[in-house]
Image (cartoon, rainbow, N blue to C red):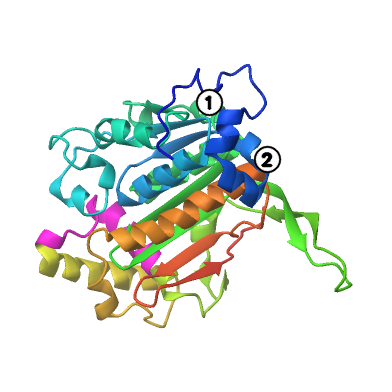
């Protein structure tokens, strides 16, 4: 995919609304996979990425290779030694440089046809109108209060919102696609007949209301343990302004146990689904977990843009110990 062409040579100017021969050759395999119309929608899509940790890097990689029109990246977090364990774009860069700027050249090399832009402003400075220019927004490595605020502004501007994180062996993603109409493939009645595409609609809700549901009051008592962990990790970050640090493992474990007690009580969850052993496996970013969750998120963004294929509705919960993912639907009606 690292084809050495500039945008003019590849015929990617805004005036062209057709797929050129160069693009057809570059994206041949995915055009065969999801069709020409989908590829046209991708080349018109503008995506905002907030957070370029290991998970963000996986999402950016897959979207860049897919051939979206542009990707705007926001992350001024200084590159640290920990980033090199999962964030492959910052390899060889100067320590202390912002993750987004340090990654731009490596990202652009994947696909020169995609416009990569770095926005150095902090997300908190952006008004709601800023998000209206994008087709989709993905946020990671942010406190829950920030995610809820971004989701609210995306919802107001009718922009698809995605978020996610990974912690050690575990991870999640969340989707708010508003009222989403999509085409799904269903088999016809007869064995001799081929499949057909039919339109279906899914209603989504923002992250805040979805996480506000209590066990026994809309939340299933058999909810997956990673969902409980998601709430524990969000509460930990809100309370302590950072994720659990591997360098201070023992003291952080004690804090995690305290946050777990608070979270279980807040969710009205009597069963302790998240044991001490699970809490001991939430430190740092693991590249394979980032790859698994990031690949799914990027694919969901592509499905959302193309409106082809049934999307996740609305939480994906990933357990790296068993290498399984579970979809949980938690939708709060107005």
| Relative image position of residue 183 (x, y in whole percent) | 74, 52
At x 29%, y 76%, the residue is 278
Looking at the image, can residue 177 be seen?
A: no
What kind of element bears circle 2? helix
Do residues under tags 1 and 2 come within 8 Å of each other at their CB atoms?
no
**In the image, farthest residue toward the bottom:** 271
| Relative image position of residue 242 (x, y in whole percent) | 23, 52
What kind of element bears circle 1? helix
Prevailing secondary structure class for the magenta stretch in the rendered image: helix
Q: Which residue is mark 2?
A: 36
At x 24%, y 56%, the residue is 243
Say left or right for 56 vs 253: right
Q: Which residue is mark 1?
A: 129
239 or 274: which is nearer to us? Answer: 274
| Relative image position of residue 104 (x, y in whole percent) | 31, 31
Looking at the image, can residue 36 be seen?
A: yes
Is residue 259 positioned above or below 17 on the image?
Answer: below
Q: Which residues are magenta?
A: 229-247
């Amino acid at each position: 995919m690292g084809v050495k062409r500039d945008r003019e040579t590849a015929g990617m100017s805004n005036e062209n609304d057709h797929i050129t021969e160069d693009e057809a050759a570059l994206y041949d395999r995915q055009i065969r996979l999801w069709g020409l119309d989908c590829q046209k929608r991708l080349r018109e899509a503008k995506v905002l990425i907030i957070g370029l940790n290991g998970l963000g890097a996986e999402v950016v990689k897959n979207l860049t290779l897919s051939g979206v029109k542009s990707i705007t990246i926001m992350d001024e977090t200084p590159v640290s030694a920990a980033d090199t364990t999962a964030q492959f774009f910052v390899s060889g860069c100067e320590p202390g440089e912002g993750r987004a700027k340090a990654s731009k050249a490596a990202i652009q090399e994947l696909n020169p046809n995609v416009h990569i832009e770095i926005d150095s402003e902090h997300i908190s400075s952006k008004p709601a109108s800023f998000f209206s220019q994008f087709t989709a927004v993905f946020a990671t490595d942010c406190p829950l209060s920030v995610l809820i605020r971004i989701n609210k502004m995306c919802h107001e501007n009718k922009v698809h919102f995605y978020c996610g994180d990974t912690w050690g062996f575990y991870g999640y993603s969340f989707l708010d696609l508003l009222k989403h109409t999509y085409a799904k493939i269903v088999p016809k009645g007869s064995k001799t007949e081929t499949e057909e595409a039919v339109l279906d609609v899914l209603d989504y809700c923002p992250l805040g209301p979805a996480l506000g549901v209590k066990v026994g009051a809309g939340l299933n008592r058999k909810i997956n343990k990673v969902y409980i962990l998601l709430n524990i990790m969000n509460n930990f970050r809100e309370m302590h302004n950072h994720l659990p640090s591997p360098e201070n493992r023992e003291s952080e474990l004690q804090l995690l146990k305290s946050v777990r007690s608070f979270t279980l009580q807040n969710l009205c969850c009597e069963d302790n689904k998240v044991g001490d052993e699970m809490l001991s496996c939430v430190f740092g970013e693991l590249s394979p977990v980032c790859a698994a969750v990031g690949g799914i998120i990027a694919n969901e963004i592509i499905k959302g843009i193309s409106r082809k294929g049934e999307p996740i509705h609305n939480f994906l919960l990933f357990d790296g110990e068993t290498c399984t993912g579970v979809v949980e639907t938690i939708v709060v009606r107005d």
